[in-house]
Amino acid sequence: MNKPTLIFGPISLFSPGELADIVGRSYVELVEKWPDPWGREREKWEDFDRQAFAHPESMGKCVFVSCHEGKPVGLASYDPRPGPSYAIVGQNCVLPEYRCQGFGRLQIFEILRRFRTRKIRLARVTTSEHPFFLPAVRLYKDLGFQEIRRLVGGPDPSFHLIELEKKLLT
């Protein structure tokens, strides 16, 4: 099997609205199956898009769109501001038609590479124990992230949030 390849494009190659569209299409199954409370997340995805384009030299530089064969397949974001002690993995989503091809894994590798160039010692990520996000939990654990706690909260309070972390530098 050929190893998948991705190009991580800056948001400057895209138009406002495209980030929210990628996130929304990535989570369409979640919103369709569980419209309440997940449908309310659309406002947050649209705000994420607006903020990234409004602040291209700060937040916008911490978002990339992953392209395979010239087509967007997903996006990822991160927040290095707490560094160098730790940095946060943000959005990591892949469009449904491109899942199970290793793209989400490659996006996380790229974020971790960027953390290491900044001498970040620890990567943190928060996801959910909601069934939709269990593949993400498995991915993070497969990549060496350790669960550190579960928290009450998030869009669907009937499922805990899961916080994981991975040591990068000692």
Image (cartoon, helix red, strand yellow):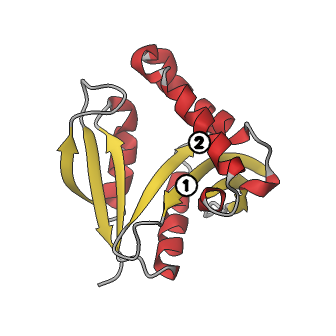
**In the picture shown, does residue 80 fall above or below 59?**
below
Image quadrant where residue 168 sits = bottom left
Residue type at the position of mark 1: Ser
Q: In what element is the residue under mark 1?
A: strand
Residue occupying the point 49% across, 28% down? 41
Give the label on residue 48, or none.
2
Q: In what element is the residue under mark 2?
A: helix
Residue 79 drawn at (x, y percent) = 48, 60
Residue occupying the point 36% across, 69% down? 86
Q: Would you say residue 96 is visible in this rendering? A: no
- Quadrant of the image for the N terminus? bottom right
Residue type at the position of mark 2: Phe
**Left or right: 129, with 49 as reference point:** left
Residue occupying the point 29% across, 84% down? 170
**Left or right: 161, with 133 as reference point:** left
Label pair 1/2, CB-CB below 8 angstroms: yes
Q: Would you say residue 11 is visible in this rendering? A: yes
- What residue is disc 1 on? 77
**In the picture shown, does residue 121 fall above or below 87?**
below
Q: Label 1, label 2: how many angstroms apart (C-alpha)?
A: 10 Å
Q: Residue furthest left?
A: 149
Mark 1 or mark 2, whichever is nearer to me: 2
Around disc 1, counting alpha carbons within 10 Å, would you say few (fewer than 14), some (14 to 19), or many (20 or more)?
Answer: many
Residue 104 drawn at (x, y percent) = 52, 52
